[in-house]
Image (cartoon, coloured by chain):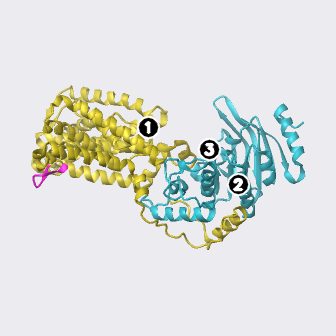
Chain colours: A cyan, B yellow
Amino acid sequence: MEEYRLELRNVSKSFGEVKALEDINFQLGWNEIVGLLGDNGAGKSTLIKIITGYHQPTSGGLYFNGQKVDHLTVPRARELGVETVYQERALAELQTLWRNIFLGRELCNSMGFLDIQRMRDETNRLMTESMGFTSTAVSPDSRVGKYSGGEKQGVAIVRALFFEADIIVLDEPTMGLSLKEAAKLVNFVKGIKQAGKSAIFIDHNIFHVYDVADRVVVLDRGKVAGEFLTKEIGLNELMEKMVHVAETGSFE
Amino acid sequence: MLPKPVVSSSEYKRMDTMNSQTNETATAVEPAAAQPYNPPFNLRKYVRANSSQLGILGVFLGLWLIFIISAPDTFLSPRIYTAFMTSTPFFAIMAIPLTVIVIAKEMDLSFPSIMAMGMVAFSFVYNQTAFIGGTTASTTVRVGLAILAALLTGIIIGWINGLIIVKVGIPSLVVTIGTQFFWRGAVLVLTSGANFTLDYIRGTIFHPMLVGKIGGFLPMQMVWLVIITILVWLLLNRHRFGAHIYLTGDNINSAELMGVNTGRTRMQAFMLVGLLSAFAGIISCFYVAYFYPNMGSGYLLNTLASVFLGGTSVFGGTGTVLGTFLGAFIIGSIDAATVAVGLTGFLTQLIYGFIIVLSVIMHTYLRKRGE
């Protein structure tokens, strides 16, 4: 077996003159949860969008299971097992729940005609079994726009887990959630680990990240400032280092 | 390409175990295939989900009732309906694909020029195939080729619109204002601004096929409108293309993050408008067997009004072809009805404006309640 499930080698990304990422080396092991920390503008979201195929790196390469993948697109990343819960949730709020669950990969026949009944059946099953939604407002035919923040996040997460993903990317999943909902989410991420999958977990909240991650990677101004195994570093020590990085740009 | 299959049953179990640890309310569930989801019919939910369509249906039936009461002689005889079904399809055929464009949060103002440009390609191909001969059979072949040329021209113009909008990234409203002038200008240059007759089409099978009358009552253009409405409805509601149209119009960012090719989807929509505008051009020219370079320019606002009257939101993501279909017939009937009811023709535009504004207010109100 290859050493890493996913590896980024010397990846850089520029938007015009702005260098969002510079020479990033990043690895995600098998059945590993990596926490990605960093201040606003550190390049976390850009890094995620390169992994999910939304952005293409300016230079450097992506390796899935040791194989280099060029010209990664969102559908290609999905085939390689990457599923994402985006910060912006990536929902279509005027559309029904089943359309959101199957957003971008509708079940259809070879002519492209939709299998609506099956999508509604599966959505109904997921709702009752996996999301634990009991509210009558949430049905396969209800519009996602009127859901609460936690329900919307639940839709985004279940959507990622429904399809056979083994790299799950969570970009600020606790944003806008209540304390109880956030705690539930942290448990969800632990469940990913137990299911034998890998995850990249990005959050502003260092407590959440420290709680679930095997390893923490700190980004600062588009560069990897450092990485730590959570079992080797205490929470207080990590926090001190984060503050130091934010002030000086390095751990030294 | 089919999406990945639904998770395997072993995985169901895994998700279940995950869940029972994370969610205290979840109960252990058999990892069987999904139970069919068939909720009992609920009238209130149905009304809520379809409020916009029911609203415009109400306006349609209400107006009809007013017409019948005020002018029973006219509106209880079939002749007026033949007249409506003759003239309305000329622009309704374009309003249907335009609905798709508006749902995708785009706009196309170039369709009247596409109508005319398609007919320029039509007559060019007809004239250039004179070598085939002058018999009835060969005229049929020449007209057939000319029709194909017109449709192809429409698709190409739609493709060019889409290319500029998607690849260069200019708002479609701006692009199609430009291309609308450009293609109208091209028509004027290529025809030197001249009208010409298309008498030769009357002898071919295409004339009864496109604009004939079934039983002296049902115009063929109405049949084509119904066929096109059904086909576009299927595309929009039962096909992946339509799903992507709604998603693109609703939230283009989400659609792209989730791997929807929004550029290709929008380009296909513009090509659909091009194709059906060229078809509408053929039909309206065939009906009078005549071409004039300004053809179609009078349809711009009628067509747009049909789409918005039908409840399609300019903000994208919602809309129905059935609403547009009804909207087109409301627009198409007011003119004749105003006169038949005994009002002066000067009132037509006032009534148009009144009904359009009231209906759009109604749709906005219904949409807010529905969400």
In the image, B308 versus A111, the foreground residue is B308
Query: Mark 2 vs mark 1: same chain?
Result: no
Of marks 2 and 3, the one in the foreground: 2
Classify mark 2: helix, strand or loop: helix
Is A217 situated above or below A101? above
Of marks 2 and 1, the one in the foreground: 2
Residue B287 appears left or right of B60: left
Furthest residue in direction front, as rendered: B69
Residue A130 picture location, percent across and down: 63, 63
Residue B309 appears left or right of B162: left
Please give the range of residues in magenta.
B212-220
Query: Mark 2 vs mark 3: same chain?
Result: yes
In the image, B241 versus B95, the foreground residue is B95
Which chain letter goes with mark 3?
A: A
As shown in the figure, which amino acid type bears the numbered disc 3?
Glu
Residue B37 picture location, percent across and down: 49, 66
Q: Does the magenta stretch include residue B215?
A: yes
Q: Earlier in the sequence, mark 2 or mark 3?
A: 3
Number of on-image labels = 3
As shown in the figure, which amino acid type bears the numbered disc 2?
Leu
Disc on res. B79: none
Residue B321 appears left or right of A119: left
Q: Which residue is drawn at 41% across and 59% down?
A: A111
Of marks 3 and 1, the one in the foreground: 3
